[in-house]
Amino acid sequence: MKKLFALMTVMTALVLMTSCSKDKDPEEISKNITGTDWAGFMTEERKDMGNWVNNGQQNFVVIHFIGTGTAPKEGTGYQVEFENSYMNSKTGYSNFKWKLEDGELRMEYEAKGWNNTYIDYNATTVTNTTLNGYMYDAVTGRHRFKMELTANGSFDWSKWRE
């Protein structure tokens, strides 16, 4: 009888775990990404015969998301990229529009030559101090960028914004 009860308990727990949604709350995502600067490395990978391969390109980036209201699902922002974490050689800059929709954080860049991207935020670690996961090229689907970003409240945008 004890084995049957234990088995039923395990089965019930498994059913509950698989039936519960694992989707993250977009309002919580919005609260966590806005109002801070995200700084860290993004490593580019390309798709090669169905596998993601590191192509040896890594940039140090700082990203800032601006939203409207207390928990917006869209807004604007800007991103600057550098060759290294010393931030002594800027390699790119773009303003962007962002939107939370269908489990994705979509970013539409204004700079020429920058493809729009998306982040599957359900498969990403998003807290008020950490933004780790993958950003995908929404145009070609052939590139993704491994993000390892942390909150950085001391970045001086006046030197870099265009």
Image (cartoon, rainbow, N blue to C red):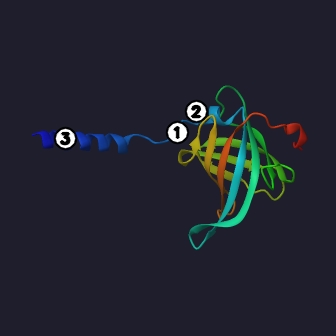
- Marks 2 and 1 in Cβ contact (< 8 Å): yes
Q: Is residue 116 above or below residue 99?
A: below
Residue shown at the point (84%, 37%) measured from the top left: 156
Residue 116 rendering spot, x and y as whole percentages: 72, 53
Residue shown at the point (80%, 37%) measured from the top left: 155
Q: Amino acid at mark 3?
A: Ala
Of 6 and 14, nearer the camera is 6
Label located before the other in sequence (1 or 3): 3
Mark 3 lies on residue: 6
Residue 15: quarter of image: top left
Q: Amino acid at mark 2?
A: Glu
Within 10 Å of disc 2 (Cα), the crowding (few <14, some 14-19, many 20+) is: some
Q: Quadrant of the N terminus?
A: top left
* C-alpha span from label 2 to label 1: 8 Å
* Secondary structure under the numbered disc 1 in the rendered image: loop
* C-alpha span from label 3 to label 2: 36 Å
Of 42 and 107, nearer the camera is 42
Residue 127 rendering spot, x and y as whole percentages: 59, 37
**Label of residue 28 in the image:** 2
Q: Is residue 142 above or below residue 41?
A: below
Q: Is residue 45 above or below residue 35?
A: below
- Marks 3 and 2 in Cβ contact (< 8 Å): no
Residue 85 rendering spot, x and y as whole percentages: 78, 50
Q: Is residue 80 above or below residue 33?
A: below
* Secondary structure under the numbered disc 2 in the rendered image: helix
Residue shown at the point (71%, 51%) measured from the top left: 41
* Secondary structure under the numbered disc 3 in the rendered image: helix
Residue shown at the point (12%, 39%) measured from the top left: 2
